[in-house]
Amino acid sequence: MKWYRYIFFLAALCVQCSLRGQNLIGEKYLWDKDQARTEGRFRSKIFIYEPAAATNFSPAVIVLPGGSYTYLAINSEGHDVAMYFASKGYVAIVLRYRMGFFGARYPQQIEDYRKAMDYVKANASSLGIDTSRIGVVGFSAGGHLAGCAALEENPHYRPAFAAMIYPVVTMREPSCHHPSKEHLLRGDLSLEGKLSLEEHVTSDMPPVFLLCCEDDPIVKTDGSHLLSSELEKKGVTCKVEFHPAGGHGFGVRPSSKSGAYLWPDRFVEWLETTVLK
């Protein structure tokens, strides 16, 4: 690579880092030092973005990146997502939950989500958050985690809404996503039913936004179809989008050639006209 290409690359990286800094007001590890010594908790962390036009009672989203429960696509499905929601007037909290790469397994990811929700609610006043309007937005394996959050039995941890974007849904064969299943269950097949979201839908679930593309080469859409059917049967408020094309892993920036294009705007419009009105 010629020298000027290195300069261009470094300049682009600096611009990206600068943009990522916009509205980022804090980072915090979730567990104290003694707790962090066990079960890989030293990596569990949140990144907090304030809205572009802050108010005293803003809605908030906890952003859950995907990555097959193995790693985290924390830029395209984390920070980029947070910056989008901050631009729309939301406080956005990116959760870096524990990953399979470092040996994590269920229920450690849920524990990190709960810890994040504890922090957000405990600091809602200083962050300008309306505690009745805290939702989750998850992608792929993070979409599965968002579904787990929506099924929380404890109302304290149940979000006001959940967006599940090209999500992992089921742990049942033949429709499961094997890498996610492997790193979440770690061979404990007794958890297959417990962690198959479509088997636990209840009428008191929060509103759900569900989106996937039929040509998804990573996660089969069978699970999303099963989940959609159950949401309808139980009368859960939901907006479901199945698109013929669009693939997987596009975060808030799907191709303009896909029907998924501008899904974030449609999601926010649905929230503000149906869920948070």
Image: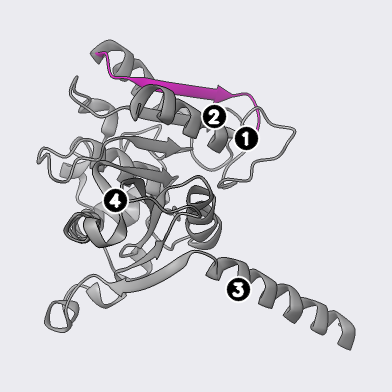
- Quarter holding the N terminus? bottom right
Precedes in sequence: disc 3 or disc 2: 3
Q: Check disc 1 and report the residue beneath it.
A: 262
**Residue at numbered disc 2:** 266
Q: Where residue 210 sits in the image (x, y, percent)? A: 43, 29
Contact between marks 1 and 2 (CB within 8 A): the answer is yes
Q: What element carries label 1?
A: loop
State the SS at label 4.
strand
**223 vs 62: above or below:** above
Quadrant containing the C terminus is: top left
Residue to which mark 4 is pinned: 129
Determine the residue positioned at 54% across, 70% down.
21
Kind of element beneath mark 2 = helix
Q: Give the range drawn in magenta.
A: 235-246
* Near-viewer residue (41 or 219): 41
- The amino acid sitting under disc 2 is Arg
Q: Position of residue 36 (x, y in %)?
A: 19, 78
